[in-house]
Image: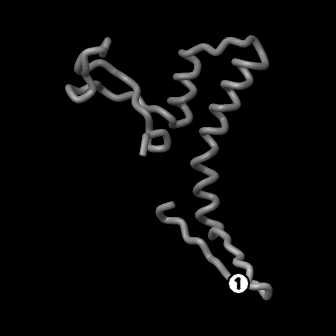
Amino acid sequence: MEGVTIVCLKDKNEHYLCQYQAEQIKQLQAKLKPLQEFTRKIIKEGCWENCEVDGGDLQDMAEKIGLIKSVEATEDDIDEDSDFEVGDIIFKFTDILKEN
């Protein structure tokens, strides 16, 4: 992981003991929190309550917790299957959900 420091030491039995520095762990936990919140909503509403997940509600929540963002569509966003035009507001994944 970029920017994460791992400290490794050998114990008396020649085993390696490795741990992340505390600050990097906190940063990773902060990035994980929105994904946990979103997943819990999907499972709770889609499986446990009424077995129906409202796409609009999920989109609103995903935007609220920073998983997606609204942007103005550009020429680069348009393809043959697009149902929007340049200048329309569309949603894109934020960095936490971008493909590597």
Depth order, front residue of 2/23: 2
Q: Is residue 50 above or below residue 63?
A: above
Dividing the picture into quadrants, the one containing residue 40 is top right
- Give the secondary structure at mark 1: strand
Q: Which residue is outermost to the left? A: 75
Say which residue appears at 79% left-offset and 88% top-offset. 12
Q: Position of residue 37 (x, y in %)?
A: 66, 35
Q: Position of residue 14 (x, y in %)?
A: 74, 84
Say which residue appears at 54% left-offset and 66% top-offset. 4
Q: Which residue is outermost to the bottom? A: 12
Q: Is residue 13 above or below residue 37?
A: below
Q: Position of residue 91 (x, y in %)?
A: 40, 26
Q: Amino acid at mark 1?
A: Lys
Q: Position of residue 71 (x, y in %)?
A: 34, 29
Q: Provide the residue designation for mark 1.
A: 10
Dividing the picture into quadrants, the one containing residue 61 is top right
Dividing the picture into quadrants, the one containing residue 72 is top left
Q: Is residue 82 above or below residue 63?
A: above
Say which residue appears at 40% left-offset and 30% top-offset. 92
